[in-house]
Amino acid sequence: MMLRFLVLLLVHLLKLISFSMVKGEYTLDSVRACLVKQEDTIIFGLIDRAKLPFNSPTYHPNHTSVPHYSASLLQFLVINTETIQAEAGRYNNPEENPFFPENLPPSIVPHYNFSQFLHPAAASVNINKFIWKLYFHELLPMFVALGDDGNYAQTAASDLSLLQAISRRIHYGKFVAEAKFRESPQDYEPLIRAQDREALMKLLTSKSVEDMVRKRIEKKAMVFGQEVSVDHDVKGKYKVDPLVVSHFYQKWVIPLTKIVEVEYFLHRLD
């Protein structure tokens, strides 16, 4: 009886330790470190997508022949993939945000005890519909060659992986905002109560940090994307233009992350 009690006590203590570690893993430094790691995923995703031409039929609503389905092949793949991933528990993780959250099924696997770091009223911020449009109208034309090689399913799969990486990076702004709020609530609370978007944007913006991110991204794209032969590197030839990657971060990723931060802050005291 005593042995059973001790075992149960040990299990309980381990759960408490595990929970405290999960709760404590989000700090401003740890969140920024995670953003740095996500840069690698995005750059490799860009490189992977650049292997294929534009393959425009992937995005035509009338290309699929699925009965009673008028969306594009990419949309068909994303919706069905998100459905399966939702059942597998992907969207129980507050770091994940679906592109088509409507009518997603509940998870059918045991729930992991994710940290309740985000404020519940603000955690639902989701700008994926804007990211979706941005991807086709702004990003793809910047780095993908025109053409059609018929690999539409492979193209859609590459798009899905890259879209999810970009979305995860931008929506990580919620974690950045919460970490900033916990460090300096006295700076943010008056602006939140006043619902002052402009002042919040000014307060959370650091040009020096943004410049450092842009330079690091460009350098990573040069290192990761350089063409290499057996004998030597092919200087100045890249799988994706590093300036394009840097521009994408400067014009879209960083500003959209800040928009997510502001939207999060506006609901932080709800």
Image (cartoon, rainbow, N blue to C red):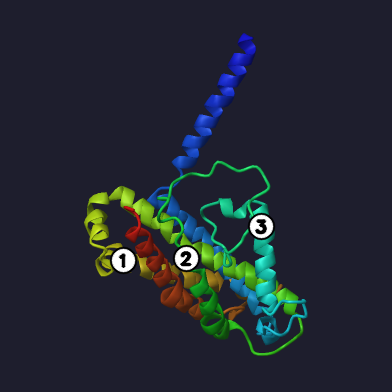
Residue drawn at x 27%, y 50% is 185
Where is mark 1, residue-wise? 205
Look at the numbered disc 3 and give the secondary structure of its residue: helix
Quadrant of the image for the N terminus?
A: top right
In three-dimensional space, the C-alpha distance between marks 2 and 3, rounded to whole angstroms, equals 20 Å
Residue drawn at x 37%, y 57% is 177
- Amino acid residing under circle 2: Ile
Nearer to us of marks 2 and 1 is 2
In three-dimensional space, the C-alpha distance between marks 2 and 1, rounded to whole angstroms, equals 15 Å
Where is mark 2, residue-wise? 170
How crowded is the residue under tag 1: few (<14 C-alpha within 10 Å), some, or many (20+)? Answer: some
Look at the numbered disc 2 and give the secondary structure of its residue: helix
Residue drawn at x 60%, y 75% is 226
Where is mark 3, residue-wise? 85
Residues 133 and 68: in front is 68
**Residue 143 at x, y = what percent?**
57, 82
**Residue 74 at x, y = what percent?**
67, 75
Whether residue 84 is visible here, answered yes or no, is yes
Please count the marks in the image: 3
Nearer to us of marks 3 and 1 is 3
Residues 70 and 230: in front is 70
